[in-house]
Image (tube, rainbow, N blue to C red):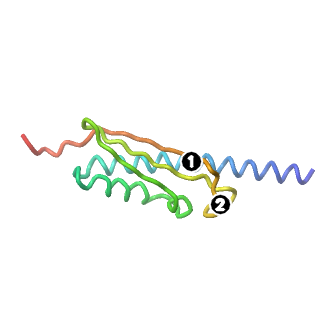
């Protein structure tokens, strides 16, 4: 009976890590796109990456990939994270969790 309980606890913990990774990816994408819309077009990628990585715990930030783009006045951010196996900061599963967000570019009031 004890092994069954331990296996159940390990699986539950792994599902918690999976859900937490989805939450982190979505939040990081929101933060990145928010910073990207406020930045000048030339500084957008740097501001986006910095904001996307800022609040990620170290175990997730190490392998994180943050990218932003602009198309037709719409800024998008995509954050890709790896799901750790049992202990954050060690081995990760071979699949990725993606978080995406988008927002309309802020009007700086210049040009007219």
Residue 76 in the image: state x and y as whole percent: 36, 42
Image check: 91 left or right of 7? left
Image check: 8 left or right of 75? right
Total number of numbered discs in the rendering:
2
Look at the image and tell me in which quarter the C terminus lies: top left
* First of labels 1, 2 by sequence position: 2
Quarter occupied by residue 91: bottom right
92 or 7, nearer to the observer: 92
Residue 105 in the image: state x and y as whole percent: 26, 41
Quarter occupied by residue 49: bottom left
The residue under label 1 is: 96
The residue under label 2 is: 91
Residue 97 in the image: state x and y as whole percent: 55, 46
Residue 101 in the image: state x and y as whole percent: 41, 41
Mark 1 and mark 2 residues within 8 Å of each other at the beta carbon = no
Secondary structure at numbered mark 2: loop
Image check: 53 left or right of 22? left
Furthest-top residue in view?
Answer: 72
Q: CA distance from mark 1 to mark 2?
A: 13 Å
């Amino acid at each position: 009976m004890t092994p069954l309980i331990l296996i159940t606890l390990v699986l539950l913990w792994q599902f918690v890590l999976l859900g937490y990774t989805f939450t982190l990816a979505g939040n990081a994408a929101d933060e990145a796109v928010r910073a990207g819309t406020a930045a000048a077009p030339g500084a957008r990628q740097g501001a986006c990456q910095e904001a996307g990585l800022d609040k990620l715990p170290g175990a997730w930030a190490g392998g994180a990939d943050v990218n932003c783009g602009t198309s037709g006045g719409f800024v998008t951010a995509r954050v890709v994270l790896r799901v750790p196996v049992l202990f954050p900061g060690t081995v990760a599963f071979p699949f990725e969790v993606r978080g995406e967000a988008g927002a309309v570019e802020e009007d700086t009031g210049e040009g007219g």
